[in-house]
Amino acid sequence: MLQAQLEDGRLILLASHQKEQIHNFRKQRFFCPACRKSVIIRAGKKIIPHFAHEQIHDCELNKTGESLYHMRGKLQLFHWLKKQGYAVRLEERVKDSARRPDLLLHTSNGRELAIEYQCASISDEELMRRNEAYERNGIVPIWILGGNRLKRTSTYMFDLPKREQRFLMQHKQNMPLQLLYYCSDTETLCNVQHILLTGKKQTVGQLFFRPLQSLCFPQIFQPLPKNLSEINQAWHSIQARAIAKPLTYAPVAMKRWLMRLYDNGLLLQDIPLSILEPVETQYQMSVPPYVWQTDMWLEVLNHLSVTESISLKRLMYTCRKWEVATKPFAISSNKHPVQSYMQRLCQHGWFDQIDSDTFVKKKGLSLF
């Protein structure tokens, strides 16, 4: 832990003191803010000054297993926010809860933000417990992933496993999907925006790297410029590669979809790229876009005559089997991926949207 209490109750952030002061602190007794057990000072040339329990026992602050990378980043983010005049505290206990976020920020308008700097993996259950605890107390959770978790594969592509898709954020309706990464070694924040999921870990997005000290906190929640053509090209390139190779393993539902393709005399390679469209709300689907979008055409859209209408509710019902049970916690939009997809088809002239629930087919396309 980065801070502990003296016998008089004062909290001491050890890393903010000089070597001589830390030496003098060794003569005093310190206590864990969570369990009130005695703690000792850990300080040296190769470690960040911090406190540790004298004995291993069951304490909420003893379970974190902080790495040097995590501890250093948490401290850097703390000083960055303090420098901007924010009221922020390290490891402060949330009222009516055992939760102690890495940073608890109190804004001037009375809101509270729990900033979690997550450098290690975390279970779905633990992530849900933390978010729900913050929500019960009216606290907005902000998750910043460790830069050690960012695996960039090209200019507009990076790997985002299913477990890390849970950290997708969209705190404002006008914001694109985003992820935040911070590297405590280089003191650089990476703001990933305009994210397009592919149904696999390979993900498309625009990555913006900035030194932390050149940023103000509100800036990280503002939309950044989008290179539309490059992003779409990267997404379509992934789709083309996906349908060009056979599925060596697939769950039962996808095998049924594949058999439906075969029954209609189609192979994966026969899927027209023109009907595959990226949608930001792909996180609501359990399979890649080329599966559920092709399934919509096979089930409904391909059988419509030109000028014939179809309801959004009917299309959503067709795709219900592909939906996931839960979506990322910090997403403000409730737009369904089928709605986003149909609106993209309208932009390309396949359909017209008559009202919020009705689409009319403008031109034919035969998959058979």
Image (cartoon, helix red, strand yellow):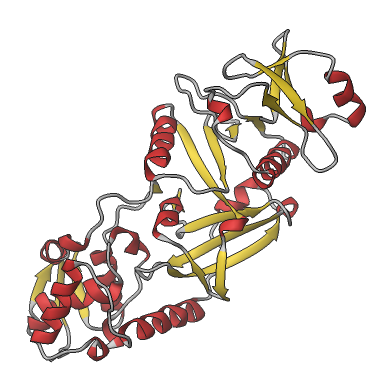
Residue occupying image coordinates x 81% and y 43%: 46
The quarter of the rendered structure image containing the C terminus is bottom left
Image spot of residue 219 (x, y percent) = 62, 52
186 horizontally vs 267: left or right: right
Residue occupying image coordinates x 70% and y 31%: 2
**Viewer-proximal residue among 179 and 75:** 75
**Viewer-proximal residue among 153 and 86:** 153
Residue 241 vertical position relative to residue 203 in the rendered view, above or below: below
Image spot of residue 258 (x, y percent) = 17, 79
350 horizontally vs 47: left or right: left
Instruction: Please tell me in which quadrant of the rendered image residue 210 appears.
Output: bottom right
Q: Is residue 142 visible?
A: yes
Residue 221 vertical position relative to residue 301 in the rendered view, above or below: above
How many labels were placed on the picture? 0
Residue 153 vertical position relative to residue 261 in the rendered view, above or below: above
237 horizontally vs 117: left or right: left
**Viewer-proximal residue among 114 and 35:** 35
Q: Is residue 13 visible?
A: no
Image spot of residue 166 (x, y percent) = 41, 52
Residue found farthest to the top: 8
Instruction: Please tell me in which quadrant of the rendered image residue 14 appears.
Output: top right
**Viewer-proximal residue among 199 and 274:** 199
254 horizontally vs 91: left or right: left
The quarter of the rendered structure image containing the N terminus is top right
Residue found farthest to the right: 20
Image spot of residue 20 (x, y percent) = 92, 26
Residue found farthest to the front: 55
Residue occupying image coordinates x 73% and y 7%: 8
